[in-house]
Image (spheres, grey):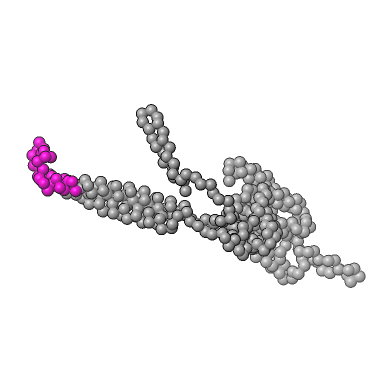
């Protein structure tokens, strides 16, 4: 994320901090409904967040919730989140979801916080205590939506199977819009029988809507996979480079050893303090010197040539990846593959060789 995006996120977080401070006290869950009224009056309908939850589960959930509030008050977000998650399994109360969202925001898990906060606000302000937290939650929801990225994936083709991060999104034709964490890597893939599979890596921007349209190309019988040149060429060049570099190493080592042996023998032969003439060296010393020089030169040349051949071979292998070619396409215009461009300048000249493939 660039400097401007980082400054923008910091500005929104600075707006969210005062709102978090207003709700620093943990949200109190609504108590279980009181005893039923007299028979003459019809019993009131239970609130949606009370439906299907037994009194026993509510009691256990409130106990876990209160323990979580203790950790919440001490800013121990991970410990509080564990208790809230256990309480939600017993009683999915909006107040518990609200505090879970705050813990997740503190841990910068914005996508999970957005999901939890939406569940906390789904019944309005009634289940929240105090009710003013509903307005705060709406504000925080807007902050989270600006920290997250929104991606709309569209595929107009019938039967196309579209997956997002390995999970089935829909089968075309159709479209889906999802919130995503822009700091994470996301991959969308579209597959269909007798069509070329399409895979795209997504890099959405926070607070923006990114539209991705997927269209698959039909795999025709005439479509063939073709390489630029024979496969063995690149591998042969690579193998030759390895052989050259490998052969140059022992030559270079032998040349260095011969130089050391020559120095030792020369010192034994030349005992004159004033020095000795090279032309008077014994024949064995001359042969040893010539051998060391030749081996050093050959070793260095082989290593340089081998390294160049290895680089060339790897490049040829990389460029020789099979390509889909359709004979029905328009013929490519013939162009000169090898071009020599002479140039004359002050002090000399040059020739540029261009090879097109």
On the image, the x and y values in percent for residue 60 come to 69, 68
On the image, the x and y values in percent for residue 351 come to 39, 37
Q: Residue at x 58, y 55 (%)?
A: 328
Q: Nearer the viewer, residue 87 or 331?
A: 331
The residue lying furthest to the right in this view is 40
On the image, the x and y values in percent for residue 2 come to 58, 43
Q: Residue at x 90, y 68 (%)?
A: 41
Q: Residue at x 88, y 68 (%)?
A: 42
63 drawn magenta: no
Which residues are drawn in magenta?
A: 262-291
Q: Visible in this render: residue 288?
A: yes
Left or right, 208 with reference to 302: right
Q: Residue at x 44, y 44 (%)?
A: 338
274 drawn magenta: yes
Q: How many marks?
A: 0
Left or right, 166 with reference to 140: left
Q: Visible in this render: residue 102?
A: no
Left or right, 339 with reference to 248: right
On the image, the x and y values in percent for residue 104 come to 63, 55
Whether residue 314 is situated above or below residue 37 in the rendered picture: above
Name the main secondary structure of what is drawn in magenta: helix
The residue lying furthest to the left in this view is 272
Q: Nearer the viewer, residue 5 or 52?
A: 5
Q: Quadrant of residue 37?
A: bottom right
Q: Quadrant of residue 232?
A: bottom left
């Amino acid at each position: 994320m660039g400097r401007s995006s980082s400054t923008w996120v910091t500005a929104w977080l600075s707006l969210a901090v005062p709102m978090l401070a207003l709700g620093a006290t943990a949200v109190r869950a609504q108590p279980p409904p009181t005893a039923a009224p007299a028979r003459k009056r019809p019993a009131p309908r239970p609130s949606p967040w009370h439906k299907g939850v037994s009194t026993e589960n509510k009691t256990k959930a409130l106990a876990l919730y209160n323990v979580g509030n203790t950790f919440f008050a001490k800013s121990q977000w991970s410990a509080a989140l564990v208790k809230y998650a256990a309480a939600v399994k017993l009683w999915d109360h909006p107040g518990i979801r609200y505090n879970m969202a705050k813990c997740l925001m503190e841990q910068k898990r914005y996508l999970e916080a957005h999901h939890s906060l939406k569940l906390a606000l789904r019944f309005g302000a009634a289940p929240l205590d105090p009710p003013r937290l509903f307005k705060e939650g709406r504000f925080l929801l807007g902050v989270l939506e600006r920290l997250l990225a929104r991606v709309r994936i569209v595929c107009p083709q019938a039967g196309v199977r579209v997956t997002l991060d390995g999970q089935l999104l829909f089968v075309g034709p159709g479209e889906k819009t999802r919130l995503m964490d822009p700091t994470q890597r996301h991959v969308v893939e579209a597959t269909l029988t007798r069509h070329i599979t399409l895979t795209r890596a997504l890099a959405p921007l926070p607070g923006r809507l990114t539209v991705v349209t997927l269209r698959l190309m039909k795999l025709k019988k005439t479509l063939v996979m073709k390489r630029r040149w024979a496969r063995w060429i690149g591998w042969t060049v690579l193998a030759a480079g390895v052989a050259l570099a490998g052969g140059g190493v022992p030559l270079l080592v032998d040349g260095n050893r011969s130089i050391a042996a020559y120095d030792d023998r020369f010192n034994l032969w030349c005992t004159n303090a004033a020095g000795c003439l090279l032309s008077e060296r014994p024949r064995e010393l001359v042969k040893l010197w010539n051998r060391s020089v030749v081996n050093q030169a050959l070793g260095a040349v082989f290593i340089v040539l081998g390294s160049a051949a290895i680089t060339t071979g790897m490049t040829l292998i990389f460029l020789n990846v099979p390509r889909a070619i359709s004979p029905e396409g328009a013929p490519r215009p013939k162009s000169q593959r090898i071009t020599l461009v002479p140039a004359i300048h002050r002090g000399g000249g040059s020739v540029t060789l261009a090879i097109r493939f």
